[in-house]
Image (tube, grey):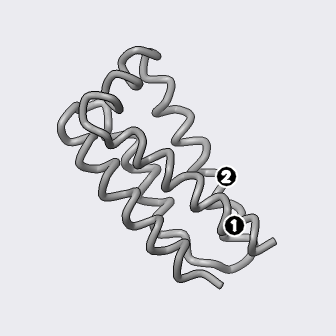
Amino acid sequence: MNGNVRTMKWVTAGYEALLGIPLIGGSIVIGFGYTPLVIAFVLHAIALILANRRGISAYGNILGIVTSIVSVIPIIGMIMHILTAFVIAIDAARQR
């Protein structure tokens, strides 16, 4: 099960990195009517639940949930997506 948590963290980190790409990420979010932010919120919630069940830290995914909410503000959202991607990637890389 720890492998599932780690995989989910890598998936959410990649998704956040995609949404953090200038112009491309914003175009994806606006083009799909902010639905990608809802998807990100759900992915982070799933990762958080899986991590909690295994007793693994999920502070990066908590930040991701906050990012999904705050990201309706364009420039702030891009910065938050990039920051969140780094935090989750580091968290996933440290996990064994």
Residue lying at the far right of the rendered structure: 1
Residue sitting at x 50%, y 51%? 14
Q: In the picture provided, is 18 more to the left or to the right than 39? A: left
State the mark number for residue 43.
Answer: none
User: Please, is residue 83 above or below residue 31 in the view?
Assistant: below
Give whichever of discs 1 and 2 has the lower sequence position.
1
| Comparing labels 1 and 2, the label whose residue is closer to the camera | 1
Q: For this rendering, which residue is in front, 96 or 52?
A: 96
Horizontal and vertical percent position of residue 40: 52, 41
Quadrant of the rendered image containing residue 47: bottom right
Residue sitting at x 54%, y 69%? 58
How crowded pointer 1 is (Cα within 10 Å; few <14, some 14-19, many 20+) is rated as: many
Q: For this rendering, which residue is in front, 58 or 85?
A: 85
How crowded pointer 2 is (Cα within 10 Å; few <14, some 14-19, many 20+) is rated as: some
Are the residues at dot 1 and dot 2 in contact (C-beta closer than 8 Å)? Answer: no
State the mark number for residue 5.
Answer: 1
**Quarter of the image with the N terminus in it:** bottom right
Horizontal and vertical percent position of residue 43: 61, 46
Q: Residue type at mark 1?
A: Val
Q: Residue type at mark 2?
A: Ile
Q: In the picture provided, is 33 more to the left or to the right than 78? A: right
Residue sitting at x 46%, y 33%? 37
Horizontal and vertical percent position of residue 50: 71, 63
Residue denoted by label 2: 46
**Quarter of the image with the C terminus in it:** bottom right
Q: For mark 2, give the secondary structure.
A: helix
Horizontal and vertical percent position of residue 28: 41, 24
Cα distance in 3D space between marks 1 and 2: 9 Å
Q: In the picture provided, is 76 more to the left or to the right than 16? A: left
